[in-house]
Amino acid sequence: MVSTSENKNYKVIGTRPIRHDGYDKVTGRAQYGADIKLPGMLIGAVLRSPYAHAKIKSIDTSEAEKMDGVFAVMTSKDLPRLGDVVRGNSEESGSEKHLSENVMAFDKVLYKGHVVAGVAAKDQNTAFEAVKKIKVDYEVLKPVINVDQAMAKDAPILHEDYTGDHLGKKVKNSNVAAHARHEVGDIDDGFKKSDLVVEKEVDMQTVHQGYIEPHSGTAVWDEEDRVKVWTSTQGSFSVRDSVSKVLDLDVSRVKVTPMEIGGGFGGKIPIYLEPIAAVLSKKTRRPVKAMMSRTDVFDATGPGPGGKVKVKIGIDSEGKILAAYADIRLEAGAYPEAFIEAAAKCVFSCYDVPSMKIDAYDVLVNKPSSAPYRAPASPQVAFATETVVDEICEIKGYDPIDFRLMNVAEKGTRTALGPKYRTIGLKECLEAAKNSNHWKSTLDSNPSPGKKRGRGIASGYWFNIGFKSSVNLSLNPDGKVALTEGSTDIGGSRASIAMQAAEVLGIAAEDVRPSVVDTDSIGITDVTGGSRTTYATGYAAYNAAHKLIEEIIEKAAIKWDISEDQIEYSDGIVKSKTDSELKMTLKEIADDPPGGPIVSSASVDLEEAGGGFAVHIADLEIDEETGKTDVINYTAIQDVGKAIHPSYVEGQMQGGAAQGIGWALNEEYFMNEDGVMLNSSYLDYRMPIALDLPMIDTIMVEVPSEEHPYGVRGVGEPPIVPPVPAIGNAINDALGLRLLSTPMKPSRITEALKRKK
Amino acid sequence: MIKIFLPYKIRETLGVPTEIEADGSNLRNLIDHIEDAYPGVKEYLVDEGKLKPGMSAVIDGKTTRLGLIHKLDNVSEIHFLPSIAGGSE
């Protein structure tokens, strides 16, 4: 670990206690979305479109309705038609109309797997049989499945009624939902003065987050028109908001209980089955549970966008970057939102560039609506930028770390969107990379016969959001603390949040017991996403713990009949400053405290934590005959601000690297020309498994965030950004081949080698 | 005076320079002053008494969570930007 912070003497922060939910998860006691069983529960199933683009002419549900064991059938006629109202300005951006249409198609299906009808039946087999009896008359249309097709003149249009925003102009009948531009300085002058200009275009295929647990949704619509939902989600409050909008209910009529979540990586922010289960429950007055198969997940839930990114960078004769241009075209899928603003924010984020221009296009295609995937859109743009930087270093003979240090973004550097950075730790990460055993080691130049080795390096960025979080604390009579929170726990956040409360209270992490509760039991808490949870919910826990100490002192003052300013608290002991006889443990003060139980609560609404940067080094061995690539050595370096629970920080860094390596080498939505994914199972959608990867070494760099009392930065997203370009740069080092499309799979390598020969 | 940077599309549509200057005790007040100098800007920034959905204000490098009531003491520059959807852990 490399730390630039003052080495504070923390008792809990920086230790590695066993996670509070660990035993439940390893013993199978933990309840995930599909585990819920309710009295009288029915099973829901949905009919999905076999076509990627078609008009719905009619739907005949009569045969399904006649079946024994079928309790209800629904179509979009059972949902309110929502207007095109823009929602919020956080993760759940988009329009209410599109939110609803993505749950169930109204007039058109826009991707293969789009839901057109739902059924509630006594069991799963009956539900599946009933779905087969629903007849839909489609008018099949030609789909567009990539940005080139979608942006072509005379391309079939997905949304004839949608008005796009092209640099402020309202444009109809276009698959470009938005064209945005950002400019800093004069790039024409910058390129004119450049000694060397390098330009590359990369092509990224659509990929999936690949969480283990498929989506599910269970709902009860009661006689008072209150809807209870149980689901696997990254944000119970965002589910509440979305479900209430799709069903046109007041938000207080919807209560969401988050179940344990078997992975999300951004993909468990949108809703899919929950409103359908709710409507079927309303029709049947019974609980309804609906679940997805793995193929459903691939076909119909938000993937990370594919697309094309062109980057051009000019440098002067000393190697200083003078100008940079990016043209970013990302697939939104069926409805707008391809994270183009995030892409623009990230594309040149690692460099101090005096002039920049970015054109970004949000492009509608006949694929499932894109969802966030770990640092959404940052890996796509990093592939282009870091490839160009590597090419510049190759042409000019620069050491790739020295070049990056020469042009490094630091505090005060103006970003591509305009604002200047606050304290960031990219320079420290690059220096840590340079001093690492990995970088200092010599790449073995004598691999097995027929194989070649190469090393690549790349950097990456994510900005780490803040937003709303709430925490309640209750001091139990045994002196332990119950903590309730609204952040669903994906990566060990129960522990990292409880540890921050424990640090303030001066007690063991195990003595703070965290629970993730439903939306009626805690204040509004934004999604577990954007690398915000340990930062924002942890900050709320920090504030709540300080308030709890105030309560403890107030109760002790009443008990001892002395003033509060004569009392102090530390390490689980409340005591008089002047009378050594007057002191109590937490257990003693919690046993019948005067004036009622000792509780506290706090909520926050925070700005960004300050950016998180990562630098990765990859060593590869490539079989020239088969094109098979083995990752033989990999190091992930990252500014983590302050690692609350270092094991879970390391886990995030390793997990992000593993997903990025899969993206680089194997993963893709392999689509036919009809817009049908041909590899919608884990047998065919090739994610890396443990046998495919070496031990991923981690170096945590701690440059504390100025915005958090312990210096926490988000850590979940930066590590997926550098792997694709690091792998690409290593392939170039090994073979002298600049591959510009993902995945850089064996066939692509062997074909490129043939062309080279 | 505070340096103000508006999104490209507003600048292009309304003919506003890349960098302008304005003052205000809070964000609401500042936007009113911008509107006085560049009529039409407010419609892009404010909706129903709040910062428009999808719009954010970055005040000296920090995205305000207070919106129009954000007080502007010793502020150097403000960037109005499209708000950015977040990612995930």
Image: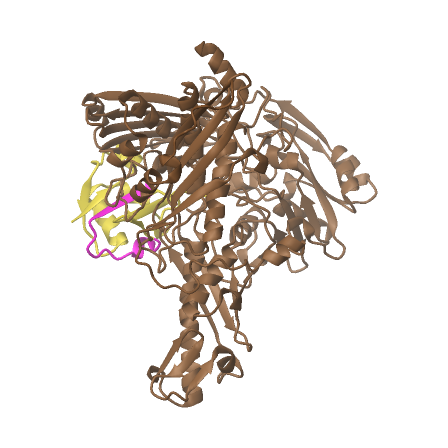
> Which shade is chain A?
brown
Give the yellow chain's letter: B
Is the residue A423 above or below the residue B8 in the image? below
Q: What is the x, y in percent for residue A656?
A: 48, 40
Furthest-front residue in this view:
A446
Q: Residue A676's image quarter?
A: top right
Q: What is the x, y in percent for residue A547?
A: 41, 71
Q: Residue A79's image quarter?
A: top right
Q: Residue at x 49, y 67 (%)?
A: A508
Furthest-right residue in this view:
A68
Nearest the eye: B76 or A132: B76
Q: Residue at x 54, y 16 (%)?
A: A625
* Color theme of the render: by chain
Q: Which residue is drawn at 51% across and 19% down?
A: A449
Residue B69 included in the magenta stretch of the image:
yes
The residue stretch that appears in magenta: B65-81
Q: What is the x, y in percent for residue A604?
A: 40, 60
Indicate the quadrant containing the C terminus of chain A: top left, top right, bottom left or bottom right: top left
Q: What is the x, y in percent for residue A57?
A: 65, 28
Is the residue A81 above or below the residue A599 in the image? above
